Image (cartoon, rainbow, N blue to C red):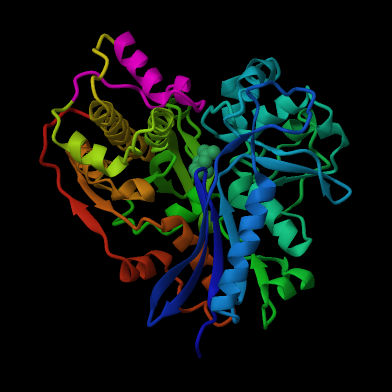
Amino acid sequence: QTQRPVAAIDLGATSGRVMIGELVDGQIQLTLVHRFANGPVALTEFETDASSQSLAWDIDGLWSQIKLGLKKAFELRADIASIGVDSWAVDYALLKDGRRLGQVRHYRDPRNELAVPELEKKFSRAELFELNGLQFLPFNTVYQLEAEQQAQRLASADQLLLVPDYINWLLTGQARCEWTNASTTGLLNQRSGTWDQELVRVLGVADKLAQIVHPGETVGSLVPELAQEFGATNAVQVVAVASHDTASAVAATPLTSKKSAYISCGTWGLVGVELTEPVLTSQAQRAGFTNELGLDGTVRVLKNVTGTFLLSESLSYWNQEAKQAGDAEVQLNDLLAEAQKLPVPQVLIDPQAEQFLAPGRMPVRISEAIIDAGGIAPESKAELIRIIIESLASSFASQAHEAARLGGFDLEDIHIVGGGSQGELLCQRIADLARVHVTAGPVECTALGNVLVQLRALPEGTHRVDDLRVVVRRSTGLRHYQPVGALKLA
Ligand code: LRH
C-alpha cells in the first residue's frame, strides 16, 4: 500500500516554506514547493499602545503565500492527504466573532520590555519559573499579554490563537491550541500540565483559550472552498504537528544517544538536551534554562541564544548601505570564506544579551559592545563576521555543557540542525570549544519533524515511522566535525 504525500507549512522569522513530504522506500523525500520572505513590518493599524517602533508580522501576506504554496503543492500532487503547520513560538492572533482584531504583534516589539516590570509587580521571575518552568524572555506570551492590558483589544477578543493555530483555523474553521506551542506561552503550569488558573485569570485570557490538542491529532478537514481553490481531489485533513518549530526540529534531530545535546540553529540557537521530566530547580532558573514540551512526552531543557539573527541583521545593514552607495550586494558566503582565514578573536560578545534583541544597526551595536568589553572595533566586515561566529560557537558550546549538567550527565556529543548547520566554521568551532564530536544536519529538520508527525498520523503510516529519528538518519546525509582547533575551556 502506498502512502499519500503530506504538505508541511514551516514559517520562520526570515522565510516561510511549503514542502511536500513522502515516504519512498523507507526514506523521507522532501520537495520544496514554495519559499517566501518573512520579517517584521511596522504596525499599521491603530492600537492604543502603539509607538513608532511597534512591530508586527505581515500575517495576511503570509496567509496569501501559504495559499499560493498549497495551490502549487496540489498542482504537483493532487493526492496530498494532510497539511501541518509549524512556526516560531509565543505570538498570537486575537479574534472576535470569527474575525481577527488588528495585526499579530512581533515578539521583538519593544512593548514587551515595558511590560516586564508590570507583570513582575504581580509575579516575580522566580515565581513565574516555579509555575511555568520557562526561561525569562521578555517576549514570552505572558509579558505580551501584560502589554495587551494597556490596549483595548484583549478585553473585546473572544479567542486567542497562536500563529500555527490561527493558520489551522483559517484552513479548517476549527479553533484548537496545540500542546507544544502552548508550552511556550508561560500560561501552562508545568506541574499540572494544564492552563495555570491564576495566570490565565490575571492576564485576562481564561475564557479565550482553545481546547488543547496534541501532535498527531486531527484539527479538522480542509474547508470545501479552500479544497476547491487548491484543486484537491481527495479529502484533506489538517493535522496538529509539533507546531512549535523547535519542537518539530528536535523531534527530528537524529540524536546519537540520551547524552547528546542539540542546537537548533536558525534566527535563534536553541541549545539543550531532551529529557522526560522538566528541571525546575533554582539552579536551572538562575542558569536561564527553559522547559518546553516536546513530542511524545519529552521535555526540552534548553536555552534560547541569539542565532543567525546577528548575521542576517548585519547583512541587511550592509546591503542597505551598499544600495544607497550604488555598490554591489554583500554576499554572506564570501565574508564567511574570508572570516575562516582570520585568527580567533580575543574579545567576544554575549549573543544572549538583551541589547541584541531588537532589529537594526547590528554591526554598529556589535562594535560598540566589543569596545565596551575592552576590545578594538573590527576593521572589516569579515572581522565582524568572525566575531559573531566565534561568539555563537563559544556560547553554544558552554550552554550545551550546562544543559547536560542540568540533565545530570556528561555531554557526549552535539547535533546541530537547521540553517546554521550549513556553516562549516561555526560547526568546527563548536566542536573545538565544546571538545566533543559535532554532527551537522539535517538543514530542513523542522520541516522533517512536521512531515513525520503527519505521516505517522495517517492510518496507513503508523507502523512505518514509529521511530522518527531512525527514518531521518536513513533519509539524510550528515556531516561530522571532530575537535581539532584552538582549545578553550567551555
Ligand atoms: C525559534 C523560536 C524559538 C522561540 C522563538 C520566539 O524559531 O520558536 O523556539 O523562543 O522562536
Q: Is residue 442 left or right of residue 9?
A: left
Nearer-the-camera pick, 17 or 143:
17
Q: Residue 97 appears at what percent x and percent y?
A: 89, 48
Q: From the viewer's perspective, is residue 369 above or below residue 248?
A: above
Asked whether residue 327 is drawn in magenta, I would say no
* Residue at x-position 20% and y-position 38%: 429
Asked whether residue 361 is drawn in magenta, I would say yes
Q: Is residue 346 left or right of residue 360?
A: left
Q: From the viewer's perspective, is residue 257 above or below residue 268?
A: below
Figure disc tally: 0
Question: Residue most toward the bottom?
Answer: 1
Q: Residue 164 appears at what percent x and percent y?
A: 64, 52
Q: Residue 365 appears at what percent x and percent y?
A: 40, 18
* Residue at x-position 13% and y-position 31%: 487
* Residue at x-position 53% and y-position 66%: 453
In this view of the protein, can residue 258 be seen by the observer?
yes
Which corner quadrant holds the C terminus?
A: top left
Q: Residue 339 appears at what percent x and percent y?
A: 20, 34
Q: Is residue 432 left or right of residue 37?
A: left
Q: From the viewer's perspective, is residue 202 above or below residue 436?
A: above
Question: Residue most toward the front?
Answer: 326
Nearer-the-camera pick, 217 or 309:
309
Residue stretch rendered in magenta on the structure: 345-372
Q: Is residue 381 left or right of residue 39?
A: left
In this view of the protein, can residue 261 be seen by the observer?
no
Nearer-the-camera pick, 424 or 37:
37
* Residue at x-position 38% and y-position 70%: 471
